[in-house]
Amino acid sequence: MRHLFLTAAVLATAAPALAEESFPATLAGHAFVPAMTMVAPPADAPRDAWVSGKFTGETPNRQPMSAPGDTGAAYGNHPTGISLPFLGQPFQGLSGFAMNRADDGSVYVLIDNGFGSKANSPDALLMFNRVTPDFDAGSVAINETVFLHDPDHKVPFRIAYEGTDSRYLTGSDFDPESIQVLNGEVWIGDEFGPWLVRAALDGRIIDVYPTLLDGQPLRSPDHPALRVPAVAGTDFQSQRSGGYEGMALQPGSNLLWAMLEKPLLAEGGEPEGDFLRVLVFDPAKGEWTGDTARFQLGEGAAAIGDFNFIDDTRALVIERDNGEGDASLKCTGEPAQDCYPNPAMAKRVVLIDTADRDENGTMRRIGHIDLMNIADPDGLARLETSRSGDGPFTFPFFTIEDVMAVSDTQIMVANDNNLPYSAGRKLGEAANNEFILLNVPELLAAQ
């Protein structure tokens, strides 16, 4: 009997895994907000906030539009044609769609921490917006901009604008990456804590919740309680820029499912695996439920970008690699200005079943669409692209961080354009804030 059991186990282990189904996607609409789009700070914001991006270099730079942006060495040092610092606050870094819309049908979209890190974003105001894409016109209306502020001193640490009366929050306080709206309140997932932030629709902070996993605090290296030296896997387990990139609101239960962007760090500082943790929070009780799940990353993927339910159990997840630019222009030798050294390859929207989990708590992947292989038979693409030869429409951005279902057959996807550091659509030009409408009936119907 022992011999037979071992044989069966070996056969089960050796059996090939069923291939995940790939579904087609067709472009149904394309709209964008130009990269160089600024919004004015509130009238009572500190004067410091009227020029943003002053601290993105080695020394402060207070001369507007004097420091040209580029994609960085890993991406070929391509110029983007836009310079820092900015007059005003940039409408960029689109980092999450809320599932529930505003009363007028507009979509809530979150802006991230500003310029990519805690150190370089103390003058970037944190905000969310209500927007209305017009796919017929190819434009996106910005209906309202709401700035996060903490007049009631709910934030449990010193903020960048601590000494001001208005107490607006900045990218040195939080890195907001996911958003949901429930019962007239806004819930935001952060990466620096990682924290869960509760706010009113006018941006006033109501509460800030620390993260607990298995009853223990979960922290990133940017948590304000940490001091150097701090040991990866011991003092902090969440990777830098690895906090709540996706946070889905479950219909019916109204529970928040907060998904980390990257794998947690185990003892010794190495990733615990090629899966991401999902923690469940109960807004009604203001506490973590203790329920956890896992999302298995697909081939070539390093992180996720957004997470939204489409019914009580099925949900959409964006997974991505760290590439940028169309693979048809991949550099074959040394990086040059006419090619992408690290092009986009793995950019997918995955459909999962959160109720179907294996013995490790891993949620079942039902299937996906490939954002690098989108049919465009009607020629709806609106932006000139860098590409070698003909091919499908692609969404070749480093960070793609917004997805939501808009009907039983369509989804909407948008990118984080990392202004002024990304040029994924066209070499030498800063990426715009693009919104694409996709026909994906087979994906949304899959079980």
Image (spheres, rainbow, N blue to C red):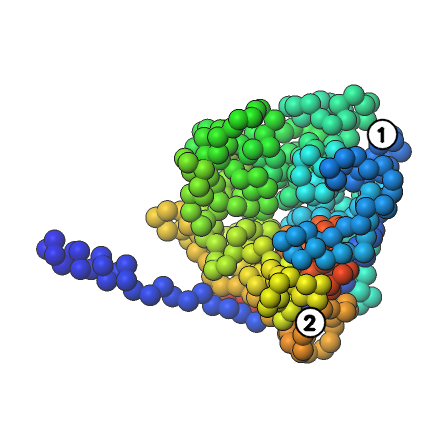
Q: CA distance from mark 2 to mark 1?
A: 44 Å
Q: Identify which amino acid the numbered label 2 is placed on.
A: Arg
Q: Is residue 10 left or right of residue 155?
A: left
Task: Work out whether residue 261 or residue 149 is closer to the camera in this orientation and state it.
Answer: 261
Give percent across and percent down for residue 313. Answer: 50, 52
In front: mark 2 or mark 1?
2
Q: Residue 160: image x %, image y %?
A: 74, 27
Kindly indicate whether the residue at mark 1 contacts the one at mark 2 (C-beta within 8 angstroms).
Answer: no
> Which badge, 2 or 1, comes first in the chain's sequence?
1
Label disc, if present, on residue 387 of the rendered structure: 2
Q: Which mark is residue 339?
A: none
In this view, the residue in front, 322 or 158, is 322
What residue lies at 74% left-to-right and 40% top-to-bottom? 56
Residue at the limit of the structure toward the front, as seen here: 334
Q: Which residue is mark 1?
A: 46
**Residue at left 63%, top 29%?**
208
The N terminus, quarter of image: bottom left
Horizontal arrangement in the rendering, residue 38 relative to residue 399 (left or right): right
Q: Is residue 373 visible?
A: yes
Give the number of callouts.
2
Q: Secondary structure at mark 1?
A: loop
Q: In the rendered structure, which amino acid carries the disc numbered 1? A: Pro
The picture places residue 330, in percent across and down from the top left corner, at: 61, 67
Q: Quadrant of residue 220?
A: top right
Residue drawn at the location 58% of the way across and 47% of the way down: 246
Determine whether the residue tagged by mark 2 lies in a helix, strand or loop. loop
Could you tell me residue 336's position as x and y percent? 68, 63
In this view of the protein, can residue 444 be seen by the observer? no
